[in-house]
Amino acid sequence: MLKEQKDAHLSSAMTIYGDYLLRVCYTYVQDWTVAEDLVQDTFVKYYEKMDQFREEASVKTYLYRIAINNCHSYLSSWRYKKIQVIDYWDKLKSLSNNPEKEVLMGETDAMLVTSIEKLPTKYKDVLLLFHFAEFSLKDVAKLLKLPENTVKTRLRRARQMVGITLLEEGFEYGSDS
């Protein structure tokens, strides 16, 4: 493939899928700057491996798989774990000084994000790809290389786990608060 063709393919992919990839990465890492870096790494890897892409899946699926692998690598890295400990400590210190901040952050959203973050990776992947990246069950199955029924089961279990966590934390369905 010629350099001009590769550049055109990359530019097109960045325009079409950039925002989606950014949202997916953000749901994993909860930091816009890191998510942007991971998306950039995704496109760099796509550009480097473009000649090896066999088109067995769509470009969207291929890019999402690269992005998710980047997120998993980042989340298992020593650097991320160190940052998490520091951030958690800073958050504890700031909340102890100003409890109003916690209320103003939007308790419902915070509880939902927290409950999703607590999910094991195999359930989090399915939930995020289906609900936030808006893939069909069939596409999620292809992307994760799983049978479609396994994806359905994991999605159902993930929803149940999130629901249980929300109930345990005092979230009431149908309430205005």
Image (tube, rainbow, N blue to C red):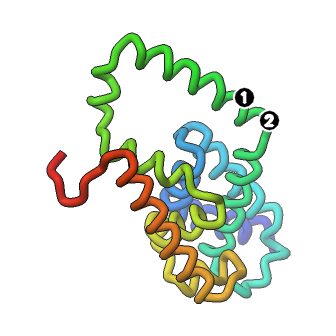
Q: Work out whether residue 44 or residue 105 is closer to the camera in this orientation and state it.
A: 105
Q: Is the residue under label 2 in contact with that under label 1 (CB below 8 Å)?
A: yes
At x 54% / y 57%, what residue is drawn?
24
**Residue kind at label 2, given as amino acid type:** Trp
Which quadrant would the N terminus be assigned to in this image? bottom right
Q: Position of residue 68 (x, y in %)?
A: 67, 60
Q: Position of residue 17 (x, y in %)?
A: 54, 64
Answer with the quarter of the image where residue 62 lies: bottom right
Residue topped by disc 2: 78
Label 2: few (<14), some (14–19) or many (≥20) C-alpha neighbours in 10 Å: few
Instruction: Kindly identify which numbered label has been placed on residue 82.
Output: 1
At x 73% / y 68%, what residue is drawn?
6
Answer with the quarter of the image where residue 42 lies: bottom right
At x 71% / y 63%, what residue is drawn?
66
Residue furthest toward the front?
168
Instruction: Kindly identify which numbered label has been placed on residue 99.
Output: none
Answer with the quarter of the image where residue 98 lies: top left
Q: Secondary structure at mark 1?
A: helix
152 w.r.t. 42: above or below? below
Q: Work out whether residue 64 or residue 158 is closer to the camera in this orientation and state it.
A: 158
At x 72% / y 71%, what residue is drawn?
5
Label 1: few (<14), some (14–19) or many (≥20) C-alpha neighbours in 10 Å: few
Left or right of 146? Residue 3 is right
Left or right of 84? Residue 158 is left
Mark pair 1, 2: CA separation: 6 Å
Q: Position of residue 159 (x, y in %)?
A: 45, 68
Marks counted in the figure total 2
Which quadrant would the C terminus be assigned to in this image? top left
Left or right of 176? Residue 99 is right
**Residue kind at label 1, given as amino acid type:** Lys
Q: Position of residue 34 (x, y in %)?
A: 62, 40
Q: Secondary structure at mark 2?
A: helix
